Image: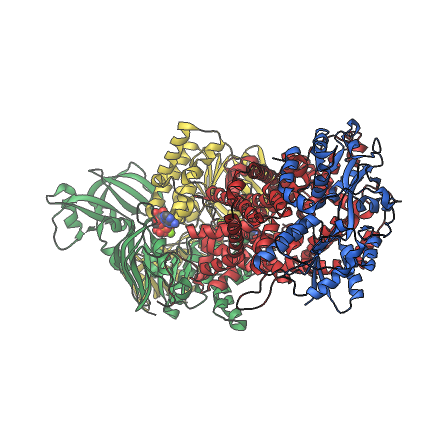
Chain colours: A red, B blue, C green, D yellow
Amino acid sequence: MNGYVRPGNSQPGWLFPAVFAVVLLLSVLPLARLAIAGIAALARGGAMSVLADPALWSATYYTLITAVLGTIISLLIGCSFAFLLTLTNISGKAVAGFCFVLPMMIPPQVTALAWVQMSGPSSPLLKALHIAPPLGTPQPLYSVGGIALLYGVQHAPLVYLALRAGLMSLPRDGVEAARLSGASSLRVFLDIILPLSLPGIIAGAAISFVSCTGNFGIPAILGIPASIYTLPTLIFTKFSAFTSRTFGDVALLSAMIALISVAGLAAQDRALRGRDYRVLGLSGAAAAFDLGNWRFLALPFVWVVLFFMLAAPFFALLAGALVPAYGVPLTFKTMSFSAFYEILFRQTVTRTAFVNSISLSAGAALCLLPVTILAATALTRRRDLLGRFVSSAIEIPYSLPGIVIAVSFILVFAAPLPFLHVTVYGTIWIIFIAYLSSFFAVSLKPVVSAFHQLDPALEEAARLSGAGFFRRLFDIIVPLVAPAAGASVILVFLIACNELTISALLWSAGTQTLGVAIYNLDDSGSSDLASALSVLVVAMVVSMMLLLELLAKRLPAGVIPWRS
Amino acid sequence: ANLVLYTSQPNEDAQATVDGFMAANPDVKVDWVRDGTPKIMAKLQAEIEAGNPVADVLLIADTVTLERLKEAGKLLAYKSPEAASYDASLYDADGYYYSTKLITTGIVYNTSAAFKPASWKDLTKAEAKGLVTMPSPLTSGAALIHAQTLAGVDGLGWDFYKDLAANGAIAAGGNGAVLKSVASGEKAFGMVVDYMPIREKAKGAPVEFVFPTEGVSAVTEPVGILASSKNADAAKKFVDYVLSEKGQEGFLKLGYIPARNDMKLPEGFPARDTIKVLPINAAEALKNTDQDLKTFSGIYGSN
Amino acid sequence: MAKLILNRLAKDFGTGRPAVNGFSLDVREGGFLALLGPSGCGKTTVLRMVAGFETPTDGSIHLGERLLADAAQSLPPERRNMAMVFQSYALWPHMSVADNVGYPLKVRGIKGDAYRRKVEEALAAVRLEAYADRRPANLSGGQRQRVALARCLVTSPDVVLLDEPLANLDRHLKQEMEETFREFHQRSGATMIYVTHDQSEAMALATDVAVMSEGKLLQVASPAEIYARPEGRIVGGLIGRGAILSVNCSMEANRQLTWDRIAPLLAGADGPPAEILVRQEDVMIGGEGVPARVVSSLYEGERYAAKLALADSQIVRAFSRTPVSVGESMNVVIRSAWRL
Amino acid sequence: MAKLILNRLAKDFGTGRPAVNGFSLDVREGGFLALLGPSGCGKTTVLRMVAGFETPTDGSIHLGERLLADAAQSLPPERRNMAMVFQSYALWPHMSVADNVGYPLKVRGIKGDAYRRKVEEALAAVRLEAYADRRPANLSGGQRQRVALARCLVTSPDVVLLDEPLANLDRHLKQEMEETFREFHQRSGATMIYVTHDQSEAMALATDVAVMSEGKLLQVASPAEIYARPEGRIVGGLIGRGAILSVNCSMEANRQLTWDRIAPLLAGADGPPAEILVRQEDVMIGGEGVPARVVSSLYEGERYAAKLALADSQIVRAFSRTPVSVGESMNVVIRSAWRL
Ligand SMILES: Nc1ncnc2c1ncn2[C@@H]1O[C@H](COP(=O)(O)OP(=O)(O)OP(=O)(O)O)[C@@H](O)[C@H]1O
Ligand SMILES: Nc1ncnc2c1ncn2[C@@H]1O[C@H](COP(=O)(O)OP(=O)(O)OP(=O)(O)O)[C@@H](O)[C@H]1O
Ligand SMILES: [Mg+2]
Ligand SMILES: [Mg+2]
């Protein structure tokens, strides 16, 4: 009958099919195309030899172990920051929160190199302390532990942002009830806050894990010297020696990564199953803990971590930009701003790259938001096979190395689109679509976890007020999940702004992104220019974040992740 | 449509080449894309797989790669009139590709290093223990050629690589990483392509470059035309241009050794005849690539 | 507006015991139905099915000719033109009080002056004019409840569902709000369903009272009727204050018993076993009745509520204007009783 | 255990009007204090300060000799050994009912059999044995409230704070729970503060009743005292049901007036203007009283509650066992009244 819905469905009937269609277009289509190419290649023989290759299994092992360890480290750092900065009365919250999301903007290879230098024989820090190891001592970061540590550092902000949104909607009275029950702050934290923020923690862990499985930059720098190959670095080597079988190998390796990330997703589902996180009634202001004397411990912790995560690599970058050549010590005599001058006024590519990257990442972040909210609505309470399929399909592109996504998109889009006869390939739009596909998972995670915590009565009250689906989405749901939505937009923006491997393959004249520009400068030996550009990117992001700060009053509460 | 060039030349160099060509051929417009050889190849292969390769001309790392494309039937044969001025070993006899410059791989050392290496063998000395780094053939095309070249030399061979490994050498990342590692003093010695340390030294970096006595390997950044090109005429003009004296002067100015006979050498290089370039057979090397990579990984413990 | 028909409604949450089961009820057009029942008996679930938040697992809901829901399909809540006060209020924390109240108007496209006037009226009706700009989180419990009330009454719904809307209000406000409901009901002619635990509220407001227990409807009748002639032990025990005595009693047609019929029963008459409901106000202390002993006595302000044990130690309840103390013996007369 | 002393307590949320202001009150050791007041008058805020969730902006709270809080310092709630039923219940959605109830025990390190037994007892006391494994989200409103109750009473706190703990329960349960409170109070000797809007609850349970309004304490006394001798218009209007008449009346010492003193006042005596409180149960319909006209009449089950307009159109309230209809004229006698 017209206007009726099937029972048990609080959503319009078209919603899930629409989300399904989007996912089909963004994820399934390119991945399927790659799979077809792969199968075609393997059909010519060799599948067995790939599977029998011990390299595949050792890479799988390393991928798993580094990803798991990295996730644990990122959880430790990200969660402690989220809890400290959201729930306690630690001083300088806003500044620390602001600084904590910045490391995402520093290319991982820069952080890796900065750390390698900091801990190596030429470390200015260690030299100053006279504890620098002699030339030739093995670098401790070239190890599984080193990779995991860097994964942890690189992805901690993801965890922070995903979790913070959930912490904002903790029920205050629940915390109070626990304290009155006699629970110390620590117990309240362990028994009430931790379990209630589990959706956020799990979302953070999932993003972090998936990012680790697909990361190429860090294992390339820290793993290869120690002969530690992860699946992404192995994929890259397959591309470097192109044979007729390459697509087959790549598809197989990618399938391996996809399997790992689907397994991760299943673990996440498992962890959330059978629990209820709906905050009943009013969720008041975030609970404030008095740190008391612990702040003498917490405050240094926060700033020491920030020093290693942000300041050290950033100053390494800055130093790299100020010296004329690599290895020249930075003194007032050697310092020069010519790299900045060159980047700002001479290189035309800089401006194009800035414009491209900012519009691409802002566009992707903003376009993904509505899709994400619709998808979260459709998926949150859905527990069937189809729902799980869609969730996995959203997840997989982000878990694959950018180069694989890029290749898949070339496979789909290199030829003019059928029927439409337009070529997307070579334009900026293909990068855009690839970004949508790849970062969908990043955008979705925090929002889904916020949906898990919503009191359904709030939406019901809106329905009864006569608000149709979109109306209540705009008026009620979106403001209620605003902190998560804000986190999601900012996450996608920051990640996309810095993105390299997808655009590296998809760019063409005029569509360079910042990541590509920095990489190309670095690759061609102009590491000073590359550093200068990186510094400028960080400066740009900082100024955009400050701009947001000005807008903060007009945005819903909690949208901006470093404001409380 | 514009002529599309895929190249692995560094940014500025690519721009300079293209600018020079367009100045000489004002009627042709060139769009170019640069990236590391593996990425460019991945892009190209994916395009081919999708049935619509975009590139017309390739100007990328090494002859082995182009040899592979030639064997797959993806290249167009073109006999350039400029070929006469080139050593026959530097281009394909059927005209599928032509080398454009010589990028040699030698030894870079930090000026604070304990000794000044003169030959490849020096890197296996006890003083160099744990202080040697080299690019990995798995990430750098030049490094692969280099390994394959040295492996074929009497007295070096794979044993040399084994000795290096025993001496604590590591194979990491690309040439850029090696340079950084040596320049920053983290390692003392490295194998690296010539122009990088020479340029950096000029800017003041504490590094020196040596052409070892046994000889150096070279990649030659060949140019070739794709069989599927819809701009074959313009593409041919491009090939002619980069091979011409004018085009070669451009490379010289950028600090590379031109492939064309009788050209000068850039600033900071020793005389041409003191540089012994070790030969490599592209077809042969191509056949052995998989095996060589395995051998290398075997030595450097990967997997 | 039309009759609201609940037809053999059932809802099972899969917990083993259905929350609502075979629940049939007609609410007459413009009626004001009070729904009473012990905690957890399914009242909220019935309201939620009427509103469209839960689909019945069986049965159907009609508004006049229109099918609202059955097990296979359901008209979404936003198209039912109903309003509800939620037991948990369900205020939107991100909106001010005025925005919360005005939201249903906004959705209906009412703007400008009309909007402002209506919101002001609604806020004035619940005495929250001064709190228009506050956030719900900064209100007291009763104030939140009043915001929910104002939001519910700001439009002209066909059906109004009230889930214990006055539970957190003081007596004065309660009376005022009852007055507001009455006015609203008369003015709008909406059909109202009112869930409450407070019987005086229910009796005072409703045109009909329905009593349910364990998911089933026990009785529907006018307030006076259900008070005077409850059907069965549960309704009898739930409506009004009283005690149920087990006696042996012949099953004659007249179930209303007076003292001359009751006295013999207490003395132990013959007949089949039966239960009689003795209202607290019908037990008169003093006079020549049967002897009783005070078991407990509670001060209620206006009067004392005493529990008295009869000779056979069955309990009756009585009011007393004067203090009575536990253990005291007295005679009581039961003015009237009702055979259940 | 010791006396709970609230000393000129004040709390200002920065909204312009302080929520609590100069509130001084001693709750005697083991006392059971009912806190009454209109919605939004600051009751919850007082409880929250006692529990330690809000620090007073002024004044101090002592438990015996021990300072609990003043404007400068505050003992954290977890070290006060108190228990509270929150107006919003504050159940933990991620724990089952049994875990919610058992949590305070767990924190105190009680394990094994002792733990299980206590939880079972507490659940049994609120009639939720069958729901031990449910999540709060799957409970009805009254069931949630009972979980909160059970959690509050499972330990042996020094002070128990109850914020409208029975608002969502039906009459039967309410009575049972009142019984539970009484028992608990006797057994544990805890000091209890009980916020409610239901006066019969307050009167029945409390040893003392405090009435507050707009953040200020108006009167504290025993239930009988406060009912019989309220101070001021607000307390008079809030406690019990009645009407306040403006008359001219001499200010003699005896403020309790009988009909022979009242009749002349209604006829219009000389004297300074005064207000008298006329309780609903003291207005007798019939006899030779003053004429009055029925303004409204509400059925309450047990009786009818009527509003009557006197000759000077002042309103009094009366009960009637028989139906009265609006507009009807009758005579009324005011048996007694209290000069405020
Ligand atoms: N967090 C807050 N911020 C600002 N004002 C508040 C806050 N909490 C309560 N108030 C205000 O303080 C006053 C007292 O609130 P309180 O909750 O103590 O009232 P109450 O007596 O418990 O009322 P009720 O019976 O309605 O629950 C109210 O006017 C309320 O609006
Ligand atoms: N979502 C749910 N899942 C499972 N059981 C539920 C759910 N909601 C309610 N119930 C159960 O259904 C029964 C009826 O609940 P309902 O909320 O309708 O009771 P109620 O009559 O409104 O009670 P109260 O007066 O306490 O609010 C209760 O036993 C309750 O535990
Ligand atoms: Mg209910
Ligand atoms: Mg309150």
Q: Where is residue A5 in the image (x, y as percent from the top left)?
A: 38, 62
Q: In which quarter of the image is residue A144?
A: top right
Residues A360 and D310: in front is A360
Report the front residue among C70 and D143.
C70
Q: In this view, does D61 lie above or below B225?
A: above
Residue that sits furthest to the bottom in the current view:
C113
Q: Is residue A195 above or below residue A456?
A: above
Relative image position of residue D25 (x, y in whole percent): 53, 42
**In the displayed structure image, the side of residue A405 where residue A123 appears, left or right:** right
Q: Would residue D74 be visible to someone looking at this image?
A: no
Residue farthest along the right direction in this orientation: A333
Q: Which residue is drawn at 59% across and 38% down?
A: A66
- Which of these two is toward me, C283 or A315? A315
Furthest-left residue in view?
C270
Total tally of numbered discs in the picture: 0
Counting from the top left corner in percent of width and height, residue D259 is at: 36, 56
- As drawn, D304 above or below C13: below
- Looking at the rendered image, the quarter that the N terminus of chain A falls into is bottom left
Asked whether residue A189 is in view, the answer is: yes
The relative height of residue A214 versus residue D234 in the rendered view (above or below) is above
Could you say where residue D278 lies in the image, as x and y percent from the top left? 40, 56
User: Which is nearer the eye, C80 or C222?
Assistant: C80
